[in-house]
Structures are given as structure tokens and as C-alpha cells.
Image: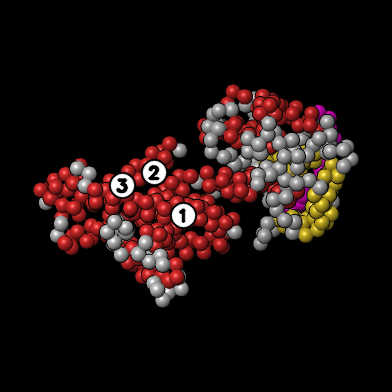
Amino acid sequence: MTGVETTLIRARDLTVGYPRAAEARVPDLDLAAGMVWHVTGPNGSGKTALLKTLAGLLRPIAGRLERNVGRGPGGAIYVHSTPYLFSGSVRRNLALARPSPPQMDGVAAILGLSSMLDRNVGELSHGEQRRVALARAIVCRPHVLLVDEPEGGLDAEALAAWKTCMTRAIEDGDTALVVATHAPVSFNGIPVREIRLSPHQR
Amino acid sequence: MLAETGRALALIAHRDVEVWQIAGVSLVVSVAALAAALVLGLPLTYAVARSGSRATRIGLWAAHSFAALPTVVVGLTLYFVLSAGGPLGWTKLLYTRTAMAVGQFALALPLLVAVVLGALHRLPESASEALLTHGVTPGRRMGWLLWEVKTAVATGAFLAFSRAFTELGSALIVGGNIRGATRTLTTYVALEYNRGDDARAIALGLILLAVALAANALMHAFTAEQ
């Protein structure tokens, strides 16, 4: 990525949603590295649909969406509010996109997963599973990280570790972060832009 | 009956050449049918599962329907296809082990597809989305998702093998029960029973049962470990 101003994803007159279901109009937005976006709105207002659309997992219902990043490592990665972990160990999950071992160990250390790399994911608590899902995405060094309800199940320590990790990536101009949550969002003073989805726009 | 069973066990214990040769043919034909069902059936099942709920529903309906096909119907159909005047008569495969394996493949495939397709359909959407969003290539995506339903793959493979190994109708019609070539445990049991050689029929029946139980034990050991 060349700089903070590079637009990674541009949306104009975008409408998102699921086939044969309700839709949500999205305010125009230009996502660039170094930014934090906070998607807000009541339940069912299309927050998850927007994140999945930006991640390239859902087709836009209408409007224009320019994605200058692909999916996966170095691209856009979406983390579910209830993530799916694949059977087997934490290590197997972190290796999903084949990161280098030092990269994997580094992220695992930051998120407090080093001691549980060889544990079966089925034995982990909900919060630990969420940490694994976040680590699995971060280890891919995405340029756009889209996280659905990041604070769900995380204890204060894990949340702080995640924020530290993300703050560094955002400040380095490597990553744009998009979070959908009802909780306040702050990352060490980095300006947070809001995308408000309203049920009236559906 | 007891005396016959004793004689049957003696035949097995003394490694009656013909008994073991027939068991070998049965095993080779059925393992080939299972291997073909796995190699072709798993990618096919994955492709159907990926094509959406409607395709999956149709796929499940088709698999369940074909799973209920009588073995003699499969045998007769294959017979007409492979007989001299049939569309594939030129292959000269009728009365060969290959023809038997093809028949057993047709009987085994629907069971494997039905079990694995159902399991793939029950996986949450977030599983395939997690693979997509992490940029996993299509080939690896199939591997990851099939590994997620590995107990269903093991169960489907066991059911498919059992169906192939224990069927009689198709093997008899397209194999012809030719001594030393296409004679299998089931076709021989039927023949020996008709001839009145109860001891040999029981011996072959016992081997059939042992192999089926061994396959079952193998499947349970695998699924229990998961």
C-alpha cells in the first residue's frame, strides 16, 4: 500500500442486503488505509450485510462498489460475530491462509494464544474462540479488516490486546478497520468515522 | 447345522484356495467400486452443495431415490448397456470384474452422496464464508469443508462399501459367476446353496459377515476418534 490516501473500497449509492430479503441504503464512503469506520444502526438495519458486501462475500443489491483489494491475505477479511472455527487445533485455524510461522507466533503472542496453539478449538471458551478468529484474520495482514461485534465475548485484557494490535496496524497506514457494533469505538485517538444505517432507509 | 458350521470353519482355517480366491475377487471389486465412488462422488457432492439449497434439495432427492434402486434393476440396466447389441457392447466388458465394479459403483455412489451432501448442507454458511474471506483457493476450500464432515464421509463410505460388498443381483447379472474370474462371495453363496454344499456356503457367508463387521469397526474407530 502506497499511502494513507489510497482508496481501498469506494461505495456510491450502494444498497446492500440478502436476496429476497430487506435491503439497506448505505451512505457514500471511501475506505482508505489508516482509517477506522464504525457501522452503527439498530438490529436488522443491514450492518452485517454491509460488512459482507465490502468484504466481497455478498453482491451489492444496487449501486456502485469499487474494490481495489481482493479477498484474503493483503486484501479484505471479514470476521463473523459468531465465527466458524475449523475442527482441530488453534494452530490449524491460524494456518488457514498459510501465514509464515513467525507471523503466526507473533500474532498469537499479542492476543494471548501462544499457550493454547495446540489445543482443540472445541475445548475453548466463547471468548477464546473469538480471539482465535481475530488472530486468524490479523495474521493475514489484511488491508481492510471488517469485524462484526468485536467486543463480543472478549474480556478487558483481550480487548485491550486486540486494540493495541489494530492501532499499530492502522497507524502504520497498513489497514483500514471497519467495525459494526453497538458499543463505543475508540482506537488511541485515531479519528473514527461513522456509517449510520437507519431502518427508515430500508 | 452345527456340523456344517464346523466344516465351514475348517474350510476357512485350512485356507481353502477357492474360498480365499473368491473372497479376494469380492474385495478387489468392491474396493474399486468404493474408490471410484469416493474419487468421483466427493467432488460431485461438493459441487452440488455449493450450487445452493435448491440444487442440494434436488441432489438429496436424487441420491435417496437411486439409493433405493433394487440391485437387479441396476444389473439388468448395465447388462443391456454392455451386451453385444447395447450402446457400450463394443467395450466387451460384460462378464468381467470391471462390469461388476461399475454396477457396484452405481449402487454405492448414491449412499455416499446422500450422507455427505446432507452433512455439507448442515454446515453453517459461516464455514464457507470463512474460507472465502481468507482467500483460500477453490481446491483447498473443498478439502477443508470435506474434512469438516469427515465423520459423514466415513459413514457414507462404510454404507457405500457395505452395499457394494454384499449385493448379489448386479454381480450375478453382469459378472456371470465365472469360476476364477467373476465369482464373488455373494454369487458363490447363492450357487453353493443351490447345489446343496451348505458348509462352503456358510464359510463364504462367515467371511462376508467378518469383512462387513471389520469395515463397521473401522468406521466406528475413525468416527470415535473424531
The residues bearing labels 1 and 2 have C-alpha atoms spaced at a distance of 18 Å
The stretch in magenta equals A188-202
The chain ID associated with circle 1 is B
Q: Are marks 3 and 1 in contact (CB under 8 Å)?
A: no
In the rendered image of this protein, does residue A53 appear above or below residue A172? below
Query: Mark 1 Cα within 10 Å, few/some/many (few <14, many 20+)?
Result: some
Q: Are marks 2 and 3 on the same chain?
A: yes
The residues bearing labels 3 and 1 have C-alpha atoms spaced at a distance of 20 Å
Q: Are marks 3 and 1 on the same chain?
A: yes
Of the numbered discs in the image, which one, if any, rests on residue B129?
Answer: none
The residues bearing labels 2 and 3 have C-alpha atoms spaced at a distance of 12 Å
The chain ID associated with circle 3 is B
| Residue B150 spot, x, y in % from top left | 48, 44
| Residue A27 spot, x, y in % from top left | 82, 51
Of the numbered discs in the image, which one, if any, rests on residue B36?
Answer: 1
Report the residue marked by disc 2: B219
Report the residue marked by disc 3: B211
Nearest to the observer: residue A45 or residue B224 = B224
**Left-right relation of A88 to A150:** left
Residue extending furthest toward the left: B3
